[in-house]
Image (cartoon, grey):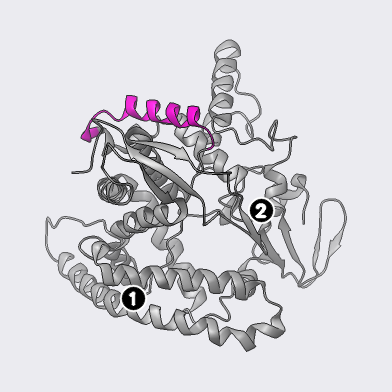
């Protein structure tokens, strides 16, 4: 594990010196699980896919994201204003987020097809469990036990692809047709976009693996404050469909960033293998041989008082206050100061720094982080505006398995629809 002062240097090393490929294949079990596609080709495709079709087109994806998120929340949390409902937080958020993401990935009507969504979710679960468990096993056990994990992976991948492959082929044909049709309207579900990019790459790739996002609200006052901020900004349908409005939700963005800081999904991360034949010398002079793995203690970094005052305290508005302090300082002095700590946008939830690596850092930072944060903002804004929430019992803690910090899966809360609030159409 590298100390914090080495992180910038570490992230700037070329791929010929440090590589994450072997880490993904071994620690993430890509070498063992039957994912059904070539790893290197898929990574290259996904980088192009996310860059060209997701991140650059978030404004065009706003409407389907909003529509499906609001519909799913109403369905899962209920619209009864008179009765409280007890829900499992983890399962309920899965039931909300998966359809919302699938609306972007697959569009209507597939994202509401019960049979397809069941197979798709189980495929995600099988891959997730396989990645987590097989990836942590000693190598001697992996080849012996991996066939057990591959059974559900193969089955549910097959069920999923029975539906997806014909759709991709249809979109490829439509893409070829639209190329010769002037004035054709561009479609921004990711099936259409993956067809476009795969046509450029002269191949067809499978795109799966949507992430699971979560946020923890720890006190009633903060929850109410988030709802007030959202209600001020989102007063009509046009506001919900305008991505620029969500950029003004500074408290919401701060809460998401603080959650990713305090509850990172990995306790160790940014792991890479030394691949240079001569090894690598660290800034402190330590020589590391070829084949060694290097990484960063993510949870230790995120809970270090040197970087975050009272780092062991969950403070949802920590970054909003810091932003306000910077603005006040700039107004008084007109000086921006150190470029690592002063630019206001570096505190956005989706923007990694050398002390905030929940989405990775440097050239290998998660390319889908802007989409994930936008979806979380939509979700959090709608829930805080429209629902009262009560905690039940003691707060559940995350469970650590290997390098992963898993959110509590048994936590429950009570929810009730607020009276005379917005609802999905």
Q: Could you tell which of marks 1 and 2 lies nearer the N-terminus?
A: 2
Q: Nearer the viewer, mark 1 or mark 2?
A: 1
In the image, what residue occupies the spot 54% across and 19% down? Answer: 327
* Residue 135 vs residue 382, the one in the foreground: 382
Residue 421 position (above or below residue 364): above
Q: Residues within 10 Å of mark 2 (few under 14, many from 20)?
A: some
227 inside magenta stretch: yes
Where is residue 308, by image quadrant? top right
Tell me which secondary structure the magenta stretch mostly adopts. Answer: helix
Lateral position of residue 85 relative to residue 352, left or right: left
Q: What residue is pinned by disc 1?
A: 160
Instruction: Classify mark 1: helix, strand or loop.
Output: helix
243 inside magenta stretch: no
In the image, what residue occupies the spot 14% across and 66% down? Answer: 180
What is the CA distance from the residue labelled 1 to the residue labelled 2? 36 Å
Q: Position of residue 151 (x, y in %)?
A: 47, 85
Please identify the residue farthest to the top as the structure is shown: 332
* Magenta span: 218-238
Instruction: Classify mark 2: helix, strand or loop.
Output: helix
Where is residue 326, by image quadrant? top right
In the image, what residue occupies the spot 68% across and 84% down? Answer: 141
Residue 343 can be seen in this image: no
Mark carried by residue 11: 2
């Amino acid at each position: 594990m590298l100390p914090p002062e080495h992180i910038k240097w570490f992230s700037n090393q070329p791929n010929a010196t440090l590589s994450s490929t072997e880490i993904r294949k071994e620690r993430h079990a890509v070498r063992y699980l039957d994912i059904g596609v070539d790893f290197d080709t898929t990574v290259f495709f996904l980088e192009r896919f996310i860059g060209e079709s997701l991140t650059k087109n978030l404004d065009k994806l706003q409407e389907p994201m909003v529509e499906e998120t609001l519909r799913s929340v109403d369905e899962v949390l209920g619209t009864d204003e008179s009765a409280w409902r007890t829900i499992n937080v983890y399962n309920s958020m899965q039931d909300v987020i998966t359809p919302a993401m699938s609306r972007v990935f697959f569009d209507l009507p597939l994202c509401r097809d019960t049979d397809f969504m069941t197979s798709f979710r189980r495929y995600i679960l099988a891959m997730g469990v396989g990645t987590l468990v097989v990836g942590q096993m000693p190598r001697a056990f992996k080849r012996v036990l991996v066939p057990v994990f591959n059974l559900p992976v193969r089955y549910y991948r097959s069920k999923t692809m029975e539906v997806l492959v014909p759709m991709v082929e249809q979109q490829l044909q439509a893409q070829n047709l639209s190329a010769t049709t002037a004035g054709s309207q561009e479609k921004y579900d990711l099936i259409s976009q993956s067809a476009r990019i795969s046509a450029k790459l002269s191949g067809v790739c499978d795109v799966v693996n949507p992430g699971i996002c979560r946020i923890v609200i720890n006190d009633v006052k903060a929850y109410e404050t988030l709802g007030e901020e959202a209600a001020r900004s989102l007063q009509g349908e046009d506001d919900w469909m305008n991505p620029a409005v969500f950029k003004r939700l500074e408290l919401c963005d701060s809460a998401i960033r603080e959650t990713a800081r305090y509850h990172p999904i990995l306790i160790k991360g940014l792991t890479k293998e030394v691949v240079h034949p001569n090894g690598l010398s660290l800034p402190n002079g330590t020589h590391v041989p070829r084949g060694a793995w290097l990484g960063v203690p993510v949870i230790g970094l995120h809970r270090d008082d040197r970087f975050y005052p009272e780092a062991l305290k969950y403070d949802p508005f920590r970054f909003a206050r810091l932003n306000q302090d910077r603005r006040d300082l700039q107004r008084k002095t007109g000086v921006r100061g150190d470029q690592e700590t002063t630019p206001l946008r570096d505190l956005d939830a989706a923007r990694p720094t050398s002390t905030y690596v929940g989405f990775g850092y440097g050239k290998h930072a998660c390319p889908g982080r802007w989409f994930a944060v936008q979806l979380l903002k939509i979700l959090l804004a709608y829930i805080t505006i429209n629902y009262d929430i009560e905690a039940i019992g003691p707060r559940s803690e995350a469970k650590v398995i290997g390098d992963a910090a898993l959110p509590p899966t048994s936590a429950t809360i009570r929810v009730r629809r607020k009276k005379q609030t917005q609802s999905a159409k």
